[in-house]
Each structure stands twice: as structure tokens, then as C-alpha cells.
Amino acid sequence: MHVPFLFDISELVRYLFVVPLLISCETFIDPWLKKVVQYLREHLVDAQDQERFSAIVQHHLRLRNSDFLEFSLLILVFFWQWVDVSTHAPVVSTWHLLPGGNQPSYAFNYYIYLAKPLVRFIWLRWLLRYLVWSLFLIRLQKLPLKLLPTHPDRHGGLLFVSTGHTKFAVLAFAFAIQAAGILAEQIIFEGKTLYSFRYVIMGITFIMAIIILSPLVAFTSKLMDAKRHGLFDYGALANKHAALFKEKWIDNFDQNKDSLLGAADVSSLADMNGSYDVVKDMSVCLISKDNVIALLIAVLLPFTPLLLTVYPFDELLKHFIKAIM
């Protein structure tokens, strides 16, 4: 298969879309992570644990910003590329060779010795940053956080952490774009069908979900403890409240009937019942439905243009309009 550069879809996608996205998404992810750390410091970490929390934050910041680790990654990618070159597969793109010969072109030398290693370095750097953040979350769950079973987010006040963490779905989006480019090339130039890649797409979706969402599972035991204690505490409080309500308005109704209309006790009972329902409905998993939907969109959206290899654009447009009408 001989593919000219302008039709080398996988490479065009990698350098025109994936690389700019990976470079720019730092300005999108980092502010969210800073907000999460600030939220934890101000609302969920006790005063006596602030010093320990700050030590954990500083430790992981040093890891994330380590020049030694980044230099090690740079050495790794160039060694990786040297192994690739020494076991290089037969040339499949016309731009890899000079016209009328078997010598590598200047573009190919630039690609193989500089561009490709740098792309790998950018990917590995992001994987390192994601690993450091995930380790931070795992260490964080060992702190005695001030979780509130009655918090309206139904996650004890931790849902903001989940929201910030899910911003890493942009990495899954970038990976899916790169994978979609590779599949598009095989469909167009090798005659394969989109249907034949259904398990590949399903596998990518599953693996990305595991990688992005699994760190949030670390908080499950802490959420379970908070819900268990909340059910006991608010259950006991609701029982005392209900007993006093019964004593006043059922057992001694005749003495209090004149003040029944407009009595605050009735709304107080409703508020107590509502608080207990919030505790009862509290989720013990930090992975929310919104997290899953956002990740699925991020992973599957890059593959949707491949539908054009199966259906004409006007037919796809008709199906889309019919679906939303």
C-alpha cells in the first residue's frame, strides 16, 4: 500500500489534531485540578489535618514537575524510537522515500527521528501527570475527610472532586481521535469495514473508562462509612423528632389543636424526613452518571465520522434530524 502524505490520514490526524489538543489541554485541566485542591483544603480537610494535606499536595507537585522524570521520559522515547527504526516495517507511504529511489526522504527522517519521539514524549508526560494525580487521590482518601451525608450532591460533598477529575476525559478524546485516524486509513486504503472494527471500538471505550474512572473508586469505602454513620445518626435523630411530634400532636392533640394551623412542627417533620431521604439516597460510588456520559461522548465522538464510510451524508443527516424531532 502506497499512501501519499496528504492522504496519510493517521499522521495528519496525529499532528493536526492530537498534538495541538495535548499541548493546549494543560490550560483546561490544570485550573480545574487547582480548584479541586482548594475545595478540599477549605471544605473537607479538618484544621488539624491541614499540615498533612499540604505535605501530600507538595509531594505530588514535586513529582508532577520533576525535571528528572521528564528527562527520563525523553531518554525513553528516543530509545523506543531507536528500537523501532532497527526493526522498521516495510515502507507503506510514498512520502517516506525520495523520488525514484529507496532512500528515506527528508520528511521521513524528520518524522522518524524527531516528530514521532516528541509525540510519544507528550503522551508519556500526560500519562505521568495523570498517574501522579491518581496517586494523590488514593493518598487523599486516607485522610479523615469531613464528609456530609446530607450534602445535596448525594456524594457527601465529594462530587466536585469527581467533576474535576473527569476533565482528564480530554486525554481519552485525544486517544480516540488518533485511533479513529488509524481505522479510517485502513477502511479507505485496505478495504476494511467499520463493522469489522466494532470490537476494537468497544475495547477502546472499555479501557478508557477503566483508566479514567477507576481512581474514583478509591473513595468508595469512605463514602460507605459516611453513609452508614449518617443513616444511624439521622435515623436516631428522626426517631426522636417523630416521637416528640407524636407526643405533641397525636397523644395530646386536644391540648394543642388550636395551634395546629400554621404550626412549624409539621414543616419541621417534613424537613427531617427530607434530610433522612438525602442520606438514604447518598451514593457510595463517586462515579456519577454524568461522568460516564461525558466519557462515552469523549471516546465515541471521534469515531462518528467513520459512519460516512457506511452511510451517505444526506442519509445520516436524515436519521439525525429524525432522532431529535
Image (cartoon, rainbow, N blue to C red):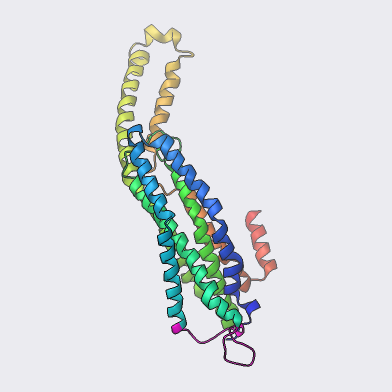
Q: Main secondary structure of the magenta part?
A: loop
Quarter residue 312 falls in: bottom right
For image coordinates 33% across by 17% down, the residue present is: 244
**Taking the image as drawn, is residue 216 in sight?**
no
Location of residue 24 with respect to 239 vertically, above or below: below
Residue 267 in which image quadrant: top left
Residue 311 coordinates in the image, percent (x, y): 63, 71
Q: Is residue 211 visible?
A: yes
Numbered range of the magenta stretch: 86-105
Point out residue 77 in the picture as x, y percentages from the top left corner.
Answer: 45, 71
| Left or right relative to 76: residue 5 | right
Instruction: Single out the residue that lies furthest toward the right.
Output: 314
19 left or right of 287 in image: right
Closer to the camera in the image, 100 or 7: 100
The x, y position of residue 213, in whole percent, is 42, 54
Q: How many marks?
A: 0
- The quadrant the N terminus occupies is bottom right
Q: Is residue 9 above or below residue 156?
A: below
Q: Is residue 84 shown in magenta?
A: no
Of 200 and 132, the residue lying toward us: 132
Residue appearing at x 33%, y 40% in the figure: 52
Q: Position of residue 188 (x, y in %)?
A: 60, 78
